[in-house]
Amino acid sequence: IRDNYNSVADEVAKQVQNDDGLRQTLEAIQITFQCCGVVRAEDWGSDIPQSCECNPYGPLGKATCKVKPQGTTGPGQIYDQSCSTIIYSWIDIAFQIFMGICFGFAVTALMGLLVSLLMIHQIKRYDNVGGASIAMKGY
């Protein structure tokens, strides 16, 4: 899954360069999550934005910084982590929550099935002993 995600992220990185709305969204993500580029800092080409400027002691704790790639303009120190790892981790968390909810519903359904089978077994056992039938009201 991660390999497919990385190939899609490469394509998204190219589209971000052409769309101002996506570009601004990615810059906001970079500031918030202390990352640079969709896949790597080189996604920005030769002009790395100020949103990649590394603040070692940001709101999310200590960030890892690196020197900007040679031949690029922009801040001297940029975030070492790419945004794809953060986006992937959010997708992974959402998937795990979804799977937990599905598993919870499955367990509940199986418990209902088990209780129903036990009730059927008890009714048949009572009828086989020769006692009076259990009156079932037909509403």
Image (cartoon, rainbow, N blue to C red):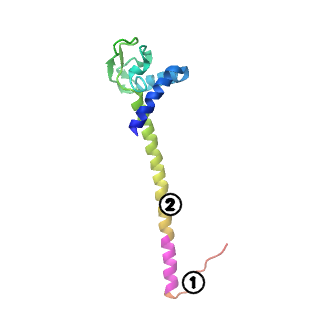
Position of residue 109 in the picture relative to residue 66 (left or right) = right
**Residue type (three-letter) at the residue carrying disc 2:** Ala
What are the residue bounds of the magenta stretch?
Answer: 117-128
Residue placed at 42% from the left, 17% from the top?
A: 45
Q: Which residue is mark 2?
A: 109
**Label 2 close to label 1 by CB (< 8 Å):** no
- Give the image quarter of residue 59: top left
- Quarter that holds the N terminus: top left
The Cα–Cα distance between marks 2 and 1, rounded to whole angstroms, is: 29 Å
Percent x, y of residue 81: 36, 26
Where is 85 relative to 58, above or below? Answer: below
The residue carrying pointer 1 sits among few (fewer than 14), some (14 to 19) or many (20 or more) residues within 10 Å by Cα, namely few
Percent x, y of residue 79: 37, 21
Where is 68 relative to 114, above or below? Answer: above
- Quarter that holds the C terminus: bottom right
Percent x, y of residue 90: 44, 36
Residue placed at 51% from the left, 69% from the top?
A: 116
What SS does tag 1 mark?
Answer: loop
Is residue 51 magenta-colored?
Answer: no
Percent x, y of residue 29: 46, 25
Residue placed at 45% from the left, 38% from the top?
A: 91
What SS does tag 2 mark?
Answer: helix
Q: Which residue is mark 1?
A: 133
Most common SS among magenta residues? helix
- Give the image quarter of residue 73: top left
